[in-house]
Image (spheres, coloured by chain):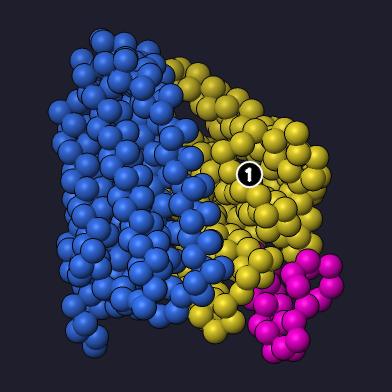
Chain colours: A yellow, B blue
Amino acid sequence: MDKKGFSQHISQQYNEELEQIINRVMTMGGLVEQQLETALVALVEGDSESGERVVTSDYRVNAMEVELDEACTHVLARRQPAASDLRLVLAVIKTITDLERIGDEAERVGRMALHLLEEDRRRSPMGEIQSLGEQIKKMLHGALDAFARMDAEQAVKVAQEDIKADAQYDAIVRHLVKYLEDHPKSVPPVLDIMWAARSLERIGDRSRNICEYVVYFVRGKDVRHTSFEQMAAEATGDRR
Amino acid sequence: MDKKGFSQHISQQYNEELEQIINRVMTMGGLVEQQLETALVALVEGDSESGERVVTSDYRVNAMEVELDEACTHVLARRQPAASDLRLVLAVIKTITDLERIGDEAERVGRMALHLLEEDRRRSPMGEIQSLGEQIKKMLHGALDAFARMDAEQAVKVAQEDIKADAQYDAIVRHLVKYLEDHPKSVPPVLDIMWAARSLERIGDRSRNICEYVVYFVRGKDVRHTSFEQMAAEATGDRR
């Protein structure tokens, strides 16, 4: 592993432990990305097999979170990390919480997809939902990529993509509200679609959280609850 | 401090640091409870001043989270805690994340309340929403109490209250769906009420998370993603 930015240790084994943890986060991230992809196929294409698969696979994401949490606790207890190593372990602990919740949201999307009939799907703004889904997939992938390379500047770029995701989500809600006003008999399926869109928007928020942990690791600065401008200034080291 | 269950240290200062952290979590918890209470007054009674207050006070909860996270990192770096002390610090790190998100949900409830007109409120199942709100307040208070006393058995009891909260939430959604079908012109306010109820339900989920961290601290066992029965067995030490 190179360019990860955590200190190189005299103990080869310690290095390997930290490397393994990062690798396992990436494996968990890959599984969560796959869950999101499958949930979107279920929602947009109405593929019920995909819906079932998302719903029945969430336990794997949960198990990975628990295992990784244990591995981090183990490193904290035995290696007593300091400075960037400590920040790395803390960033991992927070990241896996968000990944697990992203898995939950993907499961919700899959569950909503299973409720929908083909005619519900035809009458929905599925093109817009697919665009939102693509944007969210891009954000999650970008956040995991920034995490893998511990690249603070990329993390800021990905976090800023949330503005676009929020705008897409708002437009979908507006369309669905209008549709509900005109088609009061379609309330349950339209609400299912609304909940699914909401879950996608939340996955964007959580991808943004992961980006914030990357900046925290690289710069040692907590950028939660700050503006995009402040986050960008911290990420480039340009602190005003 | 007594009965907290973390080891007594030779260093008086170390004990004080851990105590201070717990006390600050309780202060943060108190503020979040107050935010929830204020949000409910805004929603149920239509008090717009309360709504404004929740929305403009969330930054205080956020600031507390960042400060407490820093204090925990400081203890991890300088004191290199092990065993129950380490579990305590990790339980705090996770608890404050949930408390911060509870603050966000309370803010959302306040924001939805500000959108509603008096007539929207009159036509809503406000009695049921108030009952759900009371249940959620009870859960949050119980979770914080279990945390303050590090009482695993109480934590399990509080977590089990989530079953009731979920049932109350489901009933509210069913009523609102029926109402929407009959009153298509009321879509936006009814959706606002639905989002607010959803936020309350989520606060219940997060209170349950806090209970799980209490069991983790006391028993050293991760009970996330397990059944209530397994959680209860772990909390009482009755492991089958």
Q: Residue at x 44, y 43 (%)?
A: B64
Is residue B203 visible in the rendered image? The answer is no
Is residue B64 visible in the rendered image? The answer is yes
Q: Residue at x 24, y 86 (%)?
A: B239
Which SS type dominates the magenta stretch? helix
Q: Residues within 10 Å of mark 1 (few under 14, many from 20)?
A: many
In the image, residue B31 sits, relative to residue A141, either above or below, namely above
Disc tally is: 1
Position of residue B88 in the picture relative to residue A148 (left or right): left
Which image quarter holds the C terminus of chain A? Answer: top right
Q: Position of residue A51 (x, y in %)?
A: 52, 57
Q: Residue furthest right?
A: A2
In-front residue for pair A134/A154:
A154
On the image, numbered disc 1 is attached to which residue?
A: A223
Give the magenta part as a residue range: A1-30
Position of residue B123 in the picture relative to residue A142 (left or right): left
The amino acid marked with disc number 1 is Val
Classify residue A171 by image quadrant: top right
Classify residue B87 by image quadrant: bottom left
Q: Residue at x 79, y 49 (%)?
A: A154
Which image quarter holds the N terminus of chain A? Answer: bottom right
